[in-house]
Image: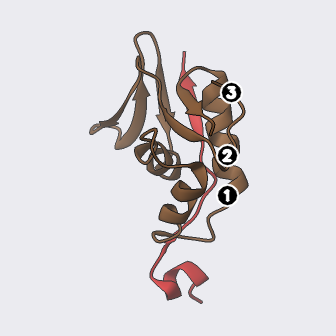
Chain colours: A red, B brown
Amino acid sequence: MRSDAARSGLLEWEPPEFDEVE
Amino acid sequence: MSTAVRPSSRPRLAPHVRLGFDRSRKKYMLLGPESVTVLNTTGAAILDLCDGQRTVAEIVAKLSSRYDHVADDEVAQFLTRLAVKRYVEAEDD
């Protein structure tokens, strides 16, 4: 089962995140 | 200068931070004088496009040519959180 992203040739979007290193 | 980043805002990195790539960890990072902030790939892709010229809407459009189903509200919220921490500056028209 391929995802929409794989079928379209685009990368899968994931929510942007950042982690501060103390 | 505002911390709320809107679709019409033109964000850029603050002068004291730069985007870098840590080869050993294979992670993108925001490097400040006394801080290191680790980014995921979409976060780095957003910041790579923040040149102070493009609006957030233009950044989302650009990302949409590479990513599937880009969530424009997530992009604006991500940049707002970084603006609150003074890592990003956003000019409004």
Assign a secondary structure to mark 2. helix
Amino acid type assigned to the residue bearing label 2 in the image = Ala
Residue B84: image location, x then y, percent: 67, 23
Disc 3 marks which amino acid?
Thr
Quadrant containing the C terminus of chain B is: top right
User: Left or right: B35 with respect to B74?
Assistant: left
Q: On screen, B60 above or below A18? A: below
Callout count: 3
Residue B3: mark: 3
Residue identified by numbered label 1: B72
Choose between A10 and B49: the one closer to the eye: B49
Looking at the rendered structure, which numbered label has been put on residue A14?
none
Host chain of mark 2: B
List x then y, in percent, for residue B70. Answer: 62, 64
Classify mark 2: residues with Cα within 10 Å, few (<14), some (14-19) or many (20+).
Answer: many
Q: Nearer the viewer, residue B33 or B13?
A: B13
Residue B44 figure quarter: top left
| Quadrant (top left, top right, bottom left, bottom right) of the N terminus of chain B | top right
- Is tag 1's residue or tag 3's residue first in the polypeptide sequence? 3
The residue at 55%/41% (across/down) is B10
Residue at 60% x, 56% y is B57
Q: Is disc 1 in contact with disc 3, using a CB cutoff of under 8 Å?
A: no
How far apart marks 1 and 2 lie (CA) works out to 6 Å
Which residue is labeled 2 in the image? B76
Quarter location, residue B80 = top right
Numbered disc 3: secondary structure: loop
Relative placement, left or right, of B31 versus B83 is left
Q: Nearer the viewer, residue B12 or B93?
A: B93
Pointers 1 and 2 in contact (CB under 8 A)? yes
